[in-house]
Image: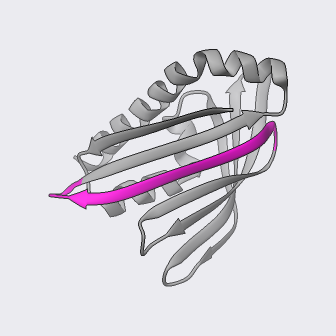
Amino acid sequence: MSSATLKKIIPCKKDQLVEMVLDIEKYPEFVPWCIEGKIFDKNESSDLITFKGDLKVGKSLLNETFSSHVSYHKETNKIIVTNLDGPLKHLKNEWHFKEINNKTQLEFFIDFELKNPILNGIMKKSFELGLNKIAKAFEDRAIRLYK
């Protein structure tokens, strides 16, 4: 399995950053290797937003679709993403948001394993580089939209 934790201060309000992270249909506009994002079965209550999300990632003919269950717990300011279907054997992804002086402290955790052991080995070698590139894309997007 591959796992990592990132912690950053993003110069925007918490609610803005949460909205941006939940809007996976816009990911192809700024997330590297993301070709398509779709949201299905969205439900919202006073303390919870849930939906099924599909992300198609890759390049041209080499791509895969990941299906996940996404839940945003409003009271604890936490997004939890778990794998439903696709090339992942396991996925746990958490986003924690804390507003501090009109900026947001973002803590991101990911733990995953691909079903294909060969691809999993390749992914482990380039995991940190890819994760940092994606994290930078989220930060740059938030700055462009909200600063």
Which sits in the foreground, 127 or 32? Answer: 127
Residue at 47% x, 62% y: name it.
78
In magenta, the rendered stretch is 86-103
Q: Residue at x 53, y 52 (%)?
A: 94
* Left or right of 61 in this view: 76: left
In the rendered image of this protein, does residue 110 appear above or below residue 63?
below
Q: Position of residue 116 (x, y in %)?
A: 85, 27
Outermost residue toward the left in this view? 101
Q: Name the quadrant of the N terminus.
A: top right
Quadrant housing residue 81: bottom right
Residue lying at the far right in this picture: please name it.
116
Query: How many numbered tags mark residues here?
Result: 0
Q: Is residue 132 left or right of residue 55?
A: left
Magenta-drawn stretch contains 100: yes
x, y percent for residue 141: 37, 39
Q: Who's the residue at 66% across and 40% down the image? A: 36
**Front-most of residues 140 and 89:** 89
Expressed as whole percent of the image width and height from the top left, the position of residue 47 reads 49, 80
Between 68 and 1, the one nearer to me in the picture: 1
45 shown above or below 66: below
Locate residue 41 relative to residue 111 in the image: left or right. Answer: right
The reply to whether the magenta stretch includes residue 21 is no
SS majority, magenta:
strand
Q: Residue at x 76, y 28 (%)?
A: 63
Vertical relation: 101 (above or below) 131: below
